[in-house]
Image: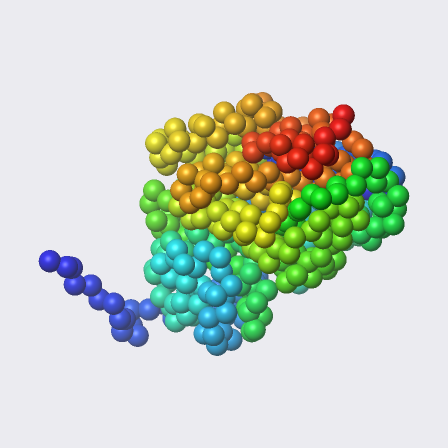
Amino acid sequence: MKYAYYPGCSLKGTGRSYEESLLPVFKALGAELNELKDWNCCGATAYMSVDEGKAAALVGRNLALAEMQGGDLVAPCAACYLTLTKTQKRMEEYPEVHGNVTRGLTASGLKYEGKVKVRHPLDVLINDIGLEAIAKKVVKPLKGLKVAPYYGCQIVRPYATFDSQDNPVTMDKLLKVVGADVVDYPLKTKCCGGSLTGTMPEVGVSLVHGLLHEARRRGADIIATVCPLCQFNLDAFQDQASKKYEKSNMPVVYLTQLLGLAMGISVKELGLHRGIVPVEPVLAQRELTHV
Amino acid sequence: MRKIVQTIKFEGDVDPTFKDWIEGVPGGEKLHSCIQCGTCSAACPVSLYMDYTPRRLMHLSREGFRDEALGSLMLWLCTSCYACTVECPRQIKVTEILYTLKRRAISEGVYPSGFPVPVLAKYFYMMVRATGRMSEMWLVSLVFLRTNIFKALAMSGLGLNLLKTGRMPLKPDMISDRAGFRRYLDAASPEKKEAGG
């Protein structure tokens, strides 16, 4: 299985441990990820607030590059995944949006015929690789580790088709197959505050607190996420939430880091040492630390 | 003494073209079918901090309260989580309508002054236009220096944490042909004077 891989800006910066864990896990499962050559930023939510035509064009260029490279396009970042799927939908629905992209591409000698399939890693793990194949690779089951599966907003809303918008379960299934205890987490698709943690901390940090509080109340040792902004907010703003609301010491890691751990990949290789709230005490307590 | 302000408008005070303009922008077409049920406001994780909740903003926009809608704080509190859009029983793309209003507020310069969110959007826009990619650390530094130096100092603890964990590359990431990239963007949609200015 070969895929084009669109890391996006966060996976090269604050979310680098997402990439560090995604690549070896996919490799071990026989899925080849080839980074999209010369990709550009997806525009996230900010570009749509300034220029709609250029926001579509940003995505259009990446789609054209992906079509040229071949294979489904894997987008692990929630914002990237959303802008890609949303722009595809808008190009079909609105001729003016299609026109923006086509004008840009034509002027640059590129083309896009609409053939790229955008995939989230959860979708690939469940539907292409499959739970059985993953189970076979488990050498160190995450026995006793209580995990709150946190999906965030933009993976399932509004356009994802691989999981439920109200109660997604793909991450729950993956965690169970590697032996973790999945705690019931009703806030699994609630917003982490996005960039409000930095711009309007009085609002953003309150959302972070709510999510941490509920995970703790449900008995979770750790929160697993598949979005770099969710991970960043819950991890990096946890000290501010602790100061303002209640003390919190909840490691927040990527799902791929936990899968890798169960598959025997080392803590360091998976970037598990990059948490601002350290994960090591929880892993030691559950006897999951290995080389 | 409290200031007396006019809180209710005469029909002649509103902009009767505002609704049609919104409905003409991709995503806005169903604004007229809002039944004011408030599902959007209930689904919204930040409506409790807003000056106008999503339901109220839909109504204001439809009735032509242009200045209130464009100048509202709520536009800049929306995190684009799409809960309202998914839950709306009339299939109104509330999030897209808010984007339409944000773009107009930025292009007319009528967003609330000193509010960091539109400043972030503009710097983000400029940075991606210049380099093709977004460097989180430079973006955040610019916005904080521009809007509130004291917050920038409070954030430095965070910056230190990110440096220590190797999560803050200092060198901005860029695509190869940046001039060609700008030509591409301008061919797709001509550069507006106000945008990013």
Q: Is residue A43 visible?
A: no
Question: Seen in the image, is B134 located left or right of residue A17?
Answer: left
x and y percent of residue B32 in the render? 49, 74
Q: Is residue B138 depicted above or below A210 in this figure?
A: above
Q: Is residue B15 depicted above or below A279 in this figure?
A: below
Q: Is residue A279 visible?
A: yes
Q: Is residue B20 depicted above or below A122 in this figure?
A: below
Q: How is the image coloured?
A: rainbow
In the foreground, A252 or A67? A252
Residue at 37% over, 36% down: B147
x and y percent of residue B77 in the render? 44, 52
What is the tally of numbered marks visible in this picture? 0
Residue at 69% over, 37% down: A286
In the foreground, A46 or A64? A46
- In the rendered image, the residue lying farthest to the left is B1
x and y percent of residue A271 in the render? 68, 30
Residue at 56% over, 63% down: B85
Residue B9, image quadrant: bottom left
Residue at 59% over, 38% down: A251
In the picture, the quarter occupied by the N terminus of chain B is bottom left
x and y percent of residue B164 in the render? 56, 23
In the foreground, A7 or B130? A7
Question: Seen in the image, is B77 located left or right of residue A89?
Answer: left
